[in-house]
Amino acid sequence: MIINTANQNTTGQIIRSLLKKEHTISIFSKEAAYAIEAKAIKIELDSGKITLAIHYTGSSLSPYLQNDTICFDIEASHPTPGIEEEIYNIEQVPAHVIKIDTCTYHLECQLPGSIFSSDNRRALRVPFILGMHARVHLEVFAHELNVEGKVRNLSVGGCMVYVRLEDSMALSINQVLPEVTLEFPNGEIFNTQGRICHMRPFGSHDYAAIGIEFINMSATMTETLFHYVSESEFEAAFRSGIQDSSSRAKSRLFIADAKEKKMQHKEEHDQTKSSQRSPLLRGVLEVAHQLQVMLMFTKNKDLFPEESLYECVDSLLYMVTQDRRGLQYALAFLHDEPEWVRHAIQVSSQLAMILISRDPYASQTRETVAGALLHTMGKPLLISEQLPSLKIRMSPSQAELLKEHVVALNNKLTALGWVASPACHDIILKCQRTARWQRLSSWKAGCRVIRACSTNQCY
């Protein structure tokens, strides 16, 4: 990568520090189900320009280019194993697209001169950069479900947070949150109510970015929030080198207390374990990630991400043909994934193994595996105040409600105008009609589905 240094742009300096580490750049769109991986090939710190190269086989880049601007995340791994990766998010960057060949593009981007930006109300938005963080607790349903995450930026109008992709199942755009609690490293807490403005996949480590607008705030609450935004602004300026370090000590908000240090130590331990994964396991976990992203778009957008579905199917079929035994081993490590995701991947993988062993060139294998991957997606679509979580010990009425998950899925797909192929649709229904499906091992379940498909029986 070419680096040109002179009168250095602050945003460019931060990006350059991240690019020196092992990193991933992802160009995203709130309208696209997956991000495009990019590579920085040139950065000019004096003019604040960066050139990104991408390989894109899709029909059009228009979903990622809004008014000739792009948005991207940079994830940089910490050199010390276990330390959380640094993620820098930058949006609405003017970009000029140059087509190099059929699938290769260069994006010449003009970075903003300041690390600070404005929200929709023209209020100052402060990014949490270079290790800054605060925790957030979202009350999804009153006294029922709480979701934890971390703050990525803050303004007096709202904030962007990231939560585990699994926890985002209960969230929807325009949903009102009874309580939003911000907890700073020194233990100070701010409470308000919120409304979800937007959602998207965040980075490549199973997170979702949630844009939240603060609502129903009193004058006193607004004044308190102004103080927190001001302190965050100083801390960001201090860490990025804009603020003279001799003029004042760092903000006390971001000095971790004993409780925060203990939580950080636990997270570092968890990060170390998650980094020790085989390539095949990472492939299986990527399918799990994409299924949850598909759910997010199916639930919140007026489209079904068909392309993502068949990418998942093709990935599983490739893994079956290349290393069946390794795939079986990897399937045992899905225990941290949501039950509906784990079940869908295990069953579809075992089903693919059986079908390929019978006939490697069968025309319906791809559609059959697609149906098996989809058949449990209706479960998280049923999450509501009546069924706040799929992890709870369910009452009889909640268990009855959950039995309608295939109906919920079919209704949603119909509303989105997506029609499954006959083989795909048939496998979804056959899975539901097998009364003992959930109590069978994945292999036996796969055999029953095959018999159901071949004999047209209903169990």
Image (tube, grey):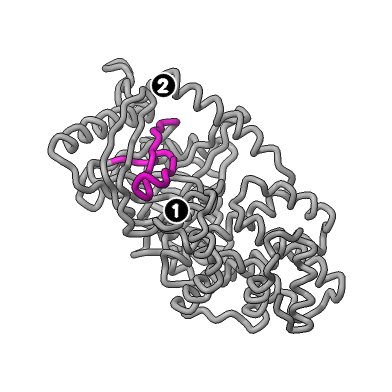
Q: Is 137 a magenta residue?
A: yes
Instruction: Between residue 444 and residue 299, name the one nearer to us.
Output: 444
Give the residue drawn at x 60%, y 58%. Answer: 340
Residue type marked 1: Pro
The span shown in magenta is: 131-154
Farthest residue toward the front? 396
Q: Secondary structure at mark 2?
A: loop
Q: Secondary structure at mark 1?
A: loop
Residue type marked 2: Ala
Q: Which mark is residue 447?
A: none
Q: CA distance from mark 1 to mark 2?
A: 33 Å
Q: State yes or no: discs 1 and 2 in contact (Cβ < 8 Å).
A: no
Residue 168 pos. (x, y %): 46, 52
Q: Earlier in the sequence, mark 1 or mark 2?
A: 2
Q: Is residue 225 left or right of residue 327?
A: left
Farthest residue toward the left? 219
Say which residue label 1 marks.
Answer: 388
Q: Is 450 a magenta residue?
A: no
> In the image, is residue 319 above or below residue 450?
above
Q: Residues within 10 Å of mark 2 (few under 14, many from 20)?
A: some
Residue 222 pos. (x, y %): 18, 38
Residue 202 pos. (x, y %): 48, 50
Q: Main secondary structure of the magenta part?
A: strand
Q: Is residue 349 left or right of residue 8?
A: right
Residue 353 pos. (x, y %): 81, 65
Give the residue drawn at x 54%, y 81%. Answer: 419
